[in-house]
Amino acid sequence: QVHLVESGGGLVQAGGSLKLSCAASGSAFSIDTMSWYRQAPGTDRELVASISNGGRITYADSVRDRFTVSRDNTKNTMYLQMNNLEPEDTAVYYCYLIAIRSATRYNYWGQGTQVTVSS
């Protein structure tokens, strides 16, 4: 079992910045891809950014050039630096992880952290 703990959400004014963290813990696993998703009320959950074990990065068009995803493999932690935040970025942000144990892939979701951007 892998446990994910997200932190860093909060309330910020438009144009401000926040940094989210997602720390993974557990035993006998390796991490493949880590991703951030978000879900605003009444909408589907959408991919924000993704980073593979090899460092390949993907961004949603709406956040490209404003958000930066990174990971520290020594700490099993992923980060999302969010700059120039817009009210449209308001959502619950979820960490998503693909872990590998004994050649089997497992998917895990974090509990989510609220990001609210005021205009």
Image (tube, rainbow, N blue to C red):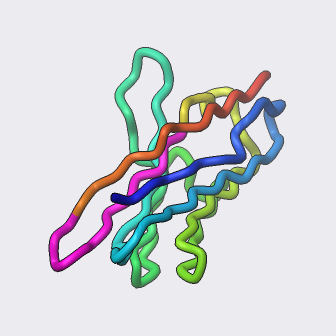
Which range is magenta? 93-105
Magenta region, main secondary structure: strand
Q: Is residue 85 above or below residue 98?
A: above
Q: Is residue 115 above or below residue 69?
A: above
Q: Residue at x 39, y 46 (%)?
A: 109
Q: Quadrant of residue 65?
A: bottom right
**Residue 45 located within the stretch drawn in magenta:** no
Q: Position of residue 64 (x, y in %)?
A: 56, 56
Q: Residue at x 62, y 62 (%)?
A: 79
**Viewer-closest of 13 and 26:** 26
Q: Is residue 96 left or right of residue 19?
A: left
Q: Is residue 32 above or below residue 61?
A: below
Q: Position of residue 117 (x, y in %)?
A: 73, 29
Q: Residue at x 81, y 33 (%)?
A: 12
Q: Residue at x 42, y 77 (%)?
A: 56
**Viewer-closest of 90 and 74:** 74
